[in-house]
Image (spheres, grey):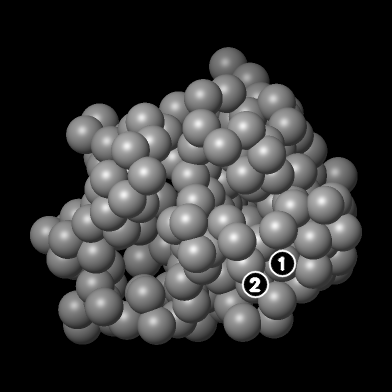
Amino acid sequence: MGSPFDRKTTPASLERGGHGVEFYAYDAQIIDKVARFVAPALESGSEVAIVIATENHRRDLEGALSARGIDVKRAAREQRYVALDAATTLSKFIVDGRPDAERFVEVIGGAVSKAQAAGRFEHVRAYGEMVALLWLAGRPEAAISLEKMWNDLARTHSFTLLCGYPISAFEPSQAAEIAEIGTTHTQVAPIQAFPRVAPAA
């Protein structure tokens, strides 16, 4: 059996309804990749984009989209582009340090449904960094649990999801947890920048 990290992809090739993950060394890398993932939705006008990220990443992403000729403010007014703060959104469904499944459906499922209903869009492209915040806070089990909740939500809501993790968040001792991240995704970006992390046995 091959490694879950053999399923390589790029944001542009992420299949509709898929759940992809990108590991990045520099902020500029993830901003470029998310822009390429989100742009088709905003350019086509047939999908809605939801971005759940840190303030700095939201700002930089909007700059990257604007550089592509996309009127981000207009897209936001038309509710085709929904930007949410990762930490604030995460706090709405965390109970005792872990994501609560019912609250997650209420908060995130509600956001997806609202975005679709606002413009009668059939599909959503979503990018999220909440899992990365949990990992950086030293709660890898909670991050993996949240990844699985996204997968459960995909059974009742139509969206394509891209997640982002900074490589600096990982330690060699977390090889098993890193491998489990791969199993929660349908498509995984190349991870050439993980020289210190040995594969799980």
Q: Are marks 2 and 1 in contact (CB under 8 Å)?
A: yes
Structural crowding at the residue carrying mark 2, measured as other residues with C-alpha within 10 Å and reported as few (<14), some (14–19) or many (≥20): some
Quarter that holds the C terminus: top right
Residue at the spot x=74%, y=53% of the render? 70
Residue type at mark 2: give it.
Answer: Arg
Report the residue marked by disc 2.
58
Instruction: Name above or below for residue 115 compared with residue 156.
Output: below
Report the residue marked by disc 1.
62
Taking the view exactly as shown, the residue that stands out farthest to the top is 1
Left or right: 173 as drawn, with respect to 195: left
Residue 110 percent coordinates (x, y): 23, 56
Instruction: Name above or below for residue 193 compared with residue 122.
Output: below
Residue type at mark 1: give it.
Answer: Glu
Left or right: 69 as drawn, with respect to 143: right
Quarter that holds the N terminus: top right
Residue 177 percent coordinates (x, y): 51, 54
- The disc placed on residue 110 is none
Left or right: 114 as drawn, with respect to 175: left
